Amino acid sequence: MQHLMRQRANRHIRELLAQDGLKISKLIQPLFVVEGLIGEEKISGLKGNNRMGIDATLNQIEKDLSNEVRNFMLFNVPADKDMKANFGTNTIRTIKEKFGSDIHLWVDTCLCSSSHDGHCCIYYEEDKNKINLKATLNALSSFALSYANAGADGIAPSDMMDGRVAAIRNQLDKNGHIDIPIMSYSTKFASEFYGPFRAAANSKPSFGDRKQYQIDVRNRNDAINSSLRCSNEGADMLMLKPAMSSIDLVAPIHTQTNLPVGVYQVSGEYASLALLAREGLTNFDKALLETWQVFHRAGAQFIITYGARKALKLGLSK
């Protein structure tokens, strides 16, 4: 059964998916929370974004709320790569205890910041070229359940494994979380534009690359089929990244799935605007707003962007 009520569950998700103009309510602000960090650390290239300890995170969310930002994507960065969700669950619980229904907290659900090798999957010990899909899906669904139990408002799997949405949906439903939506990173390219993020999330692979499970940027059919897979497995929303590499796919994927489709303006895209501005080659604020307008024009119903907290200043209404 397609559970459409998850798209209507609260005011934040209703505004996020409303089919009207570009507004702050359609933007999602990433947060990088680092276990054991006191204060905050700048992220190279990501102007206006920092790696933060929990106290700094709470202060930042307060500021973001004053700028009408209500939607957040949480990236947990544990101190130990122990494949446990303990730090993430504690962070979620702390944030939701303070802000409750004032915010909608999506939680990125992947293994790359927790795995010893920085990959989004679990490989067989005897063969580092072969993914142990069953173990990977079990770990992902376990993480997702821990996050939901802690109070996450939505789960956002970003690993690109076959079957992950179905595994997570099954785990959530059988444990009483039928109303928790899944925003799938459904079309995720193996891109050169993720550099600043990997430093921020401590998720750079220790060997190889992610081309075994992320999509070759040349392959349109694979990109569309990957989103169809997530739709068929029960995703409530689909998200494509990088935004500029996916701009031609937003409309056809929406047409073929009839699901809300959004984009992620990834770290390298955002950092390139900051670099151009630093060299005096563009106006950062105007260029940032222009990119959002283009994504919206292409049909993106929501946008994950490191500049969401600047939207009020740029003239967007809430």
Image (spheres, grey):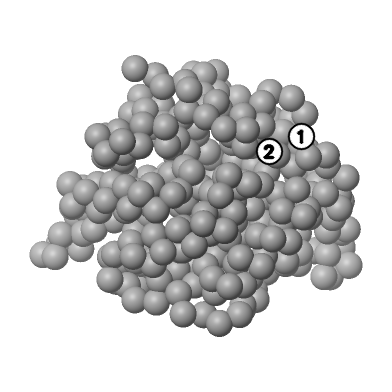
**Mark 1: which amino acid?**
Leu
Q: Name the residue: 29% across, 56% down.
A: 121
Q: Residue at x 38, y 47 (%)?
A: 148
Q: Is residue 51 left or right of residue 145?
A: right
- Furthest residue toward bottom: 38
Can you identify the residue that label 1 sits on?
Answer: 22
Q: Residues within 10 Å of mark 2 (few under 14, many from 20)?
A: many
Res 229 → quadrant: top left
The relative height of residue 311 versus residue 273 in the rendered view (above or below) is: above
Is 225 left or right of 98, judged from the image as shown?
Answer: left
Query: Can you give x and y, in whole percent of width and height, for residue 1 in the image?
Result: 34, 17
User: Is residue 180 at all visible to an observer of this figure?
Assistant: yes
Lateral position of residue 56 relative to residue 114, left or right: right
Q: Where does residue 127 sit, x and y in percent of width and height?
A: 15, 62
Q: Locate the C terminus by quadrant.
A: top right
Q: Quadrant of residue 58?
A: bottom right
The residue drawn where x is 83% and y is 39% is: 317
Q: How many callouts does the rendering have?
A: 2
Residue depicted at x 65% and y 76%:
42
Q: Nearer the viewer, residue 91 or 27?
A: 91
In the rendered view, tell whether residue 125 sits above or below residue 298. Answer: below
Query: How many neighbours does mark 1 have within 10 angstroms: few (below 14), some (14-19), or many (20 or more)?
Result: many
Real-space CA distance between mark 1 and mark 2, rounded to the nearest whole angstrom: 7 Å
Q: Which residue is mark 2?
A: 26
User: Residue 246, position in %: x, y?
Assistant: 58, 39
In this picture, is 244 found above or below 273? above
Amino acid residing under circle 2: Lys
Q: Are marks 1 and 2 in contact (CB under 8 Å)?
A: yes
